Image (cartoon, rainbow, N blue to C red):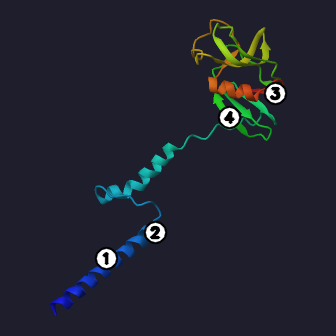
């Protein structure tokens, strides 16, 4: 009889392990969030989903700034003076790219301008080597256009400029994108 009782105990143990495995699988399959090991007390475990939600929100990049409503239609470059931001807008009205800029010392009047001229690389009126120059307006004899400094610099913010310059500076990467987008005659829409 001792051999028979050990067989029964072994069978019951195996059945119990199978039942535990099935229940564990069902529990994990029906969980609404991934299971994580619990560390600390029950109160800390209860706050874990909230902490995960806050972490997920931090990982998401901010939504891009919307194209200004009063900026026209069709393919265009939109330059918002107050926001110091540029949008490259496709023919369907969707922003393909947006980025901030360092404004020029002399600002164009809000309105629509065509790209008047372009230069791959020149020396800016401030003496800095610039590239991807896209000119679109003239204000009191000062030519206004987008450009990127070859050394990646931007004008220092604050204080009055030493010279009345018309260069709206952008990063080299943004300058290359604007250069490719804004061919001769492309609309530049300046808004407040």
Q: Is residue 51 left or right of residue 43?
A: right
Q: Which residue is mark 2?
A: 29
Q: Which residue is mark 3?
A: 186
| Label whose residue precedes the other's in the sequence (2 or 1) | 1
| Label whose residue precedes the other's in the sequence (4 or 2) | 2
Q: Which residue is mark 4?
A: 97
Which residue is drawn at the image coordinates 58% and 16% (left, top)?
Answer: 151
Camera sees residue 82: no
Of tags 2 and 1, the one toward the viewer is 1
Q: CA distance from mark 1 to mark 4?
A: 58 Å
Which residue is drawn at the image coordinates 55% and 41% (left, top)?
Answer: 61
x then y, percent, for residue 15: 32, 82
| Label whose residue precedes the other's in the sequence (1 or 4) | 1
x then y, percent, for residue 113: 82, 23
Asked if residue 45 is positioned above or below residue 88 in the image, the reply reads below
Camera sees residue 182: yes
x then y, percent, for residue 116: 82, 19
| Label whose residue precedes the other's in the sequence (1 or 3) | 1
């Amino acid at each position: 009889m001792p051999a028979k009782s050990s067989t029964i105990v072994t069978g019951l143990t195996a059945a119990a392990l199978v039942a535990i495995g099935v229940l564990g699988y069902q529990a994990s399959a029906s969980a609404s969030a991934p299971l994580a090991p619990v560390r600390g007390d029950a109160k800390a475990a209860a706050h874990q989903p909230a902490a995960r939600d806050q972490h997920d929100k931090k990982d998401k990049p901010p939504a891009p700034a919307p194209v200004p409503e009063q900026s026209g239609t069709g393919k265009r470059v939109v330059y918002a003076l107050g926001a110091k931001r540029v949008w490259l807008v496709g023919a369907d009205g969707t922003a393909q790219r947006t980025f901030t800029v360092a404004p020029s010392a002399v600002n164009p009047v809000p309105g629509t301008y065509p790209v008047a001229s372009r230069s791959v690389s020149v020396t800016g009126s401030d003496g800095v080597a610039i590239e991807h120059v896209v000119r679109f307006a003239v204000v009191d004899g000062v030519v206004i256009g987008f450009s990127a400094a070859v050394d990646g610099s931007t004008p220092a913010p604050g204080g009055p400029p030493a010279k009345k310059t018309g260069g709206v500076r952008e990063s080299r990467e943004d300058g290359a994108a604007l250069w490719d987008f804004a061919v001769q005659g492309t609309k530049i829409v300046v808004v407040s």
